[in-house]
Image (cartoon, helix red, strand yellow):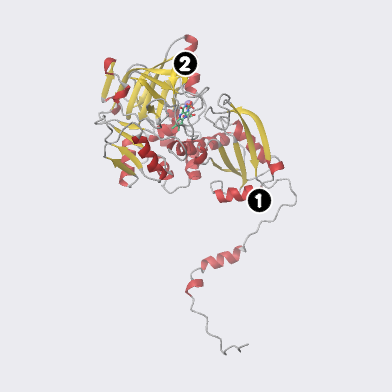
């Protein structure tokens, strides 16, 4: 047990804190995993409701399902140990500062709560866990929506944590959507060359930061375990898996161990995804996990995120982690003058970003726009960068609209780039051609090179100070005395 107040050992400590503050409710009524559970969660989220812990899932005594954990900004802030009212951009700033030039490797411990129950051989059945069926046209029950896959790179030995959706095919097989060039897909290429299966562990639970980081675009060489360590300022306790030398978080809820055989495919999907549409091509043949062993807590909590139209968990999670990782990437490029980065959750933090800068030289704003697309984060599917001057708050949409309305000049301020890496989930692209996208820089900054810049209106600073210092007096002063003489009637 870590003991310090600064971090959550596991999902349960986080749940307990949320519950104490009225930010999580238990659902005790029986709920069907077949659509009902996900629909209750989604309706709750549309109303801005709390996190939900479903304790009575039909046919699954003893297990529960957690949803809507991160649909509210306040709960994201709490997971990152900043005050709940912290603005989104400031939560991201704290993330960027905490991992700057710091990595803390995990520490191996002998055993952990994730091993309370160990199922192998005939005992292995994915359907023994209460995986929800989310939307009517989904291809199956999705057990992995807030899960992360642990894999090892054969060349470097680096352990990767990546969130990729996982659908139950049958008791011992689960389809997984690892999009091309994601870290686990690159790991898989190494095993493909050797014609060997890749050992994997699909994990649910543990410190919520594990999930926030497993769904962040860190460079291929980085281990998410070490970034989580830096964010927590303490090493992540891990244990050896049962069937491989992979390391899994000791305090996880559920660990599904197995292997992926490169090139061996089965249909996965469709799934009602976060762009608000089912995945383009319906069911697609993909690699799948052959499950060998399942370990879990005695009363496991299956954490799930809702997907579909914004704003769901998925949008908030990507909103915060893409904002933080784009900002972190830009910071690593050492470009001066970047004051703030904001990836709005409604665009999942990743299709569009607003970047605030203090221009310092000719071409500075164009440099920042191009740099955003060249980062590890922005290279993957970022389509629109809106550049704003340093007096515009990128998180304040009225101010961004002001900049777009008054400072933006379409011919000068628009630069289109034609061929960038896309996400196959983007519904703005034809279904069969979704790996490449165009991009646009929308520059609302007043040009640096103008000799005659528009003159901004400012109040008289000394007067503002005097008025503020004496504010109450404007409302408490006695009524003015009546005039001495009655005014002559006209
Ligand atoms: C809820 C959620 C679901 C996601 N599902 C997928 C998915 O099915 N496939 C995928 O490639 N990426 C998915 N992502 C995005 C990846 O998690 C993200 O790109 C991450 O960087 C992958 O890890 P990696 O960089 O180690 O490959 C999802 C993200 C979230 C928040
Ligand atoms: Mn990674």
Rendered location of residue 449, percent (x, y): 73, 45
Residue marked by disc 1: 406
Up the image or down, 245 lies above or below 398; here it is above
Q: Quadrant of residue 143?
A: top left
Up the image or down, 312 lies above or below 22; here it is above
Rendered location of residue 63, percent (x, y): 27, 31
Q: Which quadrant would the C terminus be assigned to in this image? A: bottom right
The secondary structure type at the circle numbered 1 is: helix
From the image, state whether disc 1 or disc 2 is nearer to you.
1
The secondary structure type at the circle numbered 2 is: loop
- Answer whether labels 1 and 2 touch (C-beta < 8 Å): no
Give the class, few, some or many, for how many residues have Cα within 10 Å of label 1's Cα (few <14, many ≥20). few
* Residue nearest the observer in this picture, 253 or 5: 253
Residue name at image x 65 percent, y 59 percent: 457
Residue marked by disc 2: 154
* Residue nearest the observer in this picture, 196 or 489: 489
């Amino acid at each position: 047990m870590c003991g310090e107040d600064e971090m959550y050992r596991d999902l349960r400590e986080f749940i307990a804190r949320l519950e104490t503050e009225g930010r999580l409710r238990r659902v005790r009524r029986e709920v069907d995993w077949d659509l009902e559970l996900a629909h209750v969660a989604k309706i709750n989220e549309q109303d801005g409701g709390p996190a939900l812990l479903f304790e009575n899932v039909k046919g699954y005594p003893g297990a529960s399902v957690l949803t809507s954990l991160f649909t509210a900004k306040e709960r994201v802030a709490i997971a990152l140990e900043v005050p709940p009212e912290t603005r989104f951009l400031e939560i991201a700033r704290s993330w960027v500062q905490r991992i700057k030039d710091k990595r803390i490797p995990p520490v191996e411990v002998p055993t952990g709560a994730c091993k309370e129950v160990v199922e192998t051989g005939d005992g292995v059945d994915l359907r023994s866990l209460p995986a929800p069926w989310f939307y009517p046209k989904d291809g199956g029950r999705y057990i992995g929506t807030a899960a992360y896959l642990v894999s090892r790179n054969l060349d470097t030995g680096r352990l990767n944590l990546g969130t990729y959706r996982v659908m139950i095919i049958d008791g011992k097989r689960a389809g997984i959507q690892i999009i091309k060039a994601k870290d686990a897909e690159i790991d898989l290429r190494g095993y493909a060359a050797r014609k060997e299966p890749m050992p994997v562990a699909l994990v649910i639970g543990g410190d919520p930061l594990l999930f926030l980081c497993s769904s962040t675009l860190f460079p291929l060489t980085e281990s998410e375990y070490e970034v989580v360590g830096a964010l927590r300022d303490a090493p992540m306790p891990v244990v050896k898996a049962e069937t491989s030398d992979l390391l899994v978080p000791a305090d996880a809820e559920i660990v599904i161990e197995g292997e992926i055989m490169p090139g061996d495919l089965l249909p996965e999907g469709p799934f009602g995804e976060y762009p608000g549409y089912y995945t383009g091509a319906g069911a697609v043949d993909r690699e799948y996990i052959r499950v060998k062993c399942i370990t879990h807590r005695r009363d496991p909590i299956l954490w799930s995120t809702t997907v579909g139209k914004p704003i769901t968990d998925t949008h908030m999670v990507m909103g915060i982690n893409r904002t933080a990782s784009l900002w972190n990437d830009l910071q690593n490029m050492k470009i001066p003058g970047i004051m703030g980065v904001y990836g709005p959750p409604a665009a999942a933090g990743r299709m569009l970003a607003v970047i605030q800068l203090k221009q310092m030289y000719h071409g500075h704003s164009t440099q920042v726009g191009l740099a955003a697309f060249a980062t590890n984060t922005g290279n993957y599917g970022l389509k629109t960068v809106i550049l704003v001057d340093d007096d515009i708050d990128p998180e304040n949409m009225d101010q961004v609209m002001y900049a777009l309305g008054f400072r933006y000049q379409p011919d000068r301020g628009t630069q289109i780039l034609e061929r960038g890496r896309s996400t196959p989930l983007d519904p703005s692209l034809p279904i069969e051609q979704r790996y490449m996208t165009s991009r646009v820089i929308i520059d609302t900054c007043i040009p640096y090179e103008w000799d005659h810049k528009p003159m901004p209106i400012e109040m008289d600073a000394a007067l503002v100070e005097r008025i503020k210092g004496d504010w109450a007096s404007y409302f408490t002063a006695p009524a003015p005395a009546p005039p001495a003489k009655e005014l002559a009637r006209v």
